[in-house]
Amino acid sequence: MRDFDVSSPERPVLSTDTSGRIDTDTLLQLAVAAALEVKPASLVHLDLRGLCSFTDHFLIVSAPSARQVRAIAERIEEQLREVHVRLSHREGDLESRWILLDYSDVIIHIFDEEMRQYYDLEGLWADAPKRELVQGGSSVSLR
């Protein structure tokens, strides 16, 4: 994912490939910008290219409550639907303590704090390059 300023209020510029399909970097940027609007407790990007056969990127987002988990998922889905990005699959438990949004090349995991610790995706994918975009509710510099 190319660098961008997570503290910037501006929405990322939409960029598509020659077939009109949104490129992965733009999808990542739009998803991050949408999540940031709902103020997640943390947001981490794992680059899984070369390590994983089913996706290239994970965004791991955590929030302090089920209500905020749902709000983050809804905002991301809404923003990506506006630019015609197709959601391949959505999963989550009834209490909304964890929601998965699968956009093929990018899979977004939105957890409450307890579920994030339980699943420990960062530990499972410890070999993947990791970038913390939000930590403890504050934006982290990407540069």
Image (cartoon, rainbow, N blue to C red):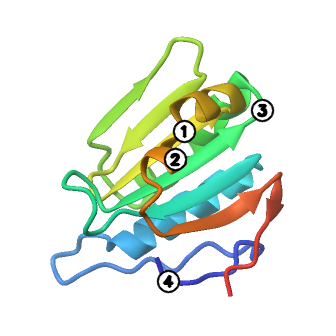
Where the C terminus falls, by quadrant? bottom right
| Nearer the camera: disc 3 or disc 1 | 1
Residue at the spot 58% in from the left edge and 21% down from the top edge = 96
Distance CA(mark 1)–CA(mark 4)? 25 Å
x, y percentage for residue 55?
27, 55
In the image, taking residue 126 as reference, residue 22 lies left or right, namely left
The amino acid type found where label 3 is placed reads Pro
Using the rendered view, name the quadrant where residue 19 is placed.
Answer: bottom left
> SS at mark 3?
loop
The amino acid type found where label 1 is placed reads Asp
Residue 92's place in the image compared with 139, above or below, is above
In the rendered structure, which disc, 2 or 3, sits on the residue that comes first in sequence? 3
Q: Which residue is mark 4?
A: 2
Foreground residue among 63 and 15: 63
Residue 64: mark = 3
> SS at mark 4?
loop
Using the rendered view, name the quadrant where residue 48 is placed.
Answer: bottom left
The amino acid type found where label 2 is placed reads Gly
x, y percentage for residue 28?
47, 65
Distance CA(mark 3)–CA(mark 4)? 28 Å
Label pair 2/1, CB-CB below 8 angstroms: yes
Q: Which residue is mark 1?
A: 120
